[in-house]
Amino acid sequence: MIDNVQIQNGLYKEKSFYGSGIPIVRIDNFYNGKLIYNNLKKLNITDEEKKRYFLKKGDILLNRVNSDEFVGKCCIFNGENSTTVYESNIMRFRVKEDKILPEYLVFYLSSVGGKEQILSKIKRAVNQVSVNQEDIKSIEIPLPKLEKQSVIIDIINKNIKTAEFLKDIRNSNKNYLKEEIDSFYSNL
């Protein structure tokens, strides 16, 4: 079970509150574990809402309402903008970092085992699925000591960098091959 964590759903505001104010993270602002800052919408909120829904460095964001494919996607807020809040379709986790590292939890929830557990708890509605805080709290998380969590994080990050490097090489080769083919045919 997910212990050592504080979970809270995000802020709902009507469309008329959008346009100016402070940045708000929405479900389309993160993908593949990465938060995309360049297209955050702005929202007018009260000081009380700001206090309740602000994000701080290390907070985990989890998509709680979407399709089967995207429910459960998550990322870590890195504190790039300290006055950012998050919308109602997202849960915020604050972990006790002396027990579990945020990046370890995100990697686990994004793994096949984590995703299977999330999908086993979804509730279906018309064209969407959802999970609630109790569903997420009931997920069984393997919890090694912090040192082992750090090692796991380092290994996963190295593999991600290797995969990104190989993807860049593949794309470069693909472009080179296209240029060669085009050049061959243009010289006929």
Image (cartoon, helix red, strand yellow):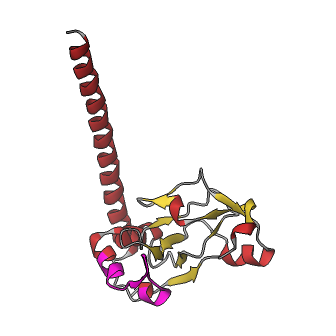
Task: Indicate whether residue 28 is drawn in magenta.
Answer: no
Whole-percent x and y of residue 3? 45, 87
Image quarter for residue 145?
A: bottom left
Whole-percent x and y of residue 49? 73, 77
Q: Quadrant of the N terminus?
A: bottom left
What residue sits 51% from the left and 77% below the top?
Answer: 95
Asked whether residue 172 appears in the rendered view, the answer is yes
Whole-percent x and y of residue 46? 79, 74
Image quarter for residue 171?
A: top left
Whole-percent x and y of residue 73? 42, 68
Q: How many marks?
A: 0
Q: Relative to the observer, which residue lies in front, 138 or 26?
A: 26
Task: Indicate whether residue 131 is drawn in magenta.
Answer: yes
59 lies left or right of 175: right
Asked whether residue 143 appears in the rendered view, the answer is no
13 lies left or right of 78: right
What residue sits 48% from the left and 84% below the top?
Answer: 4
Q: Which residues are magenta?
A: 116-135
Compared with residue 49, is residue 138 higher up or lower down, i.e. above or below? Answer: below
Compared with residue 177, is residue 113 higher up or lower down, i.e. above or below? Answer: below
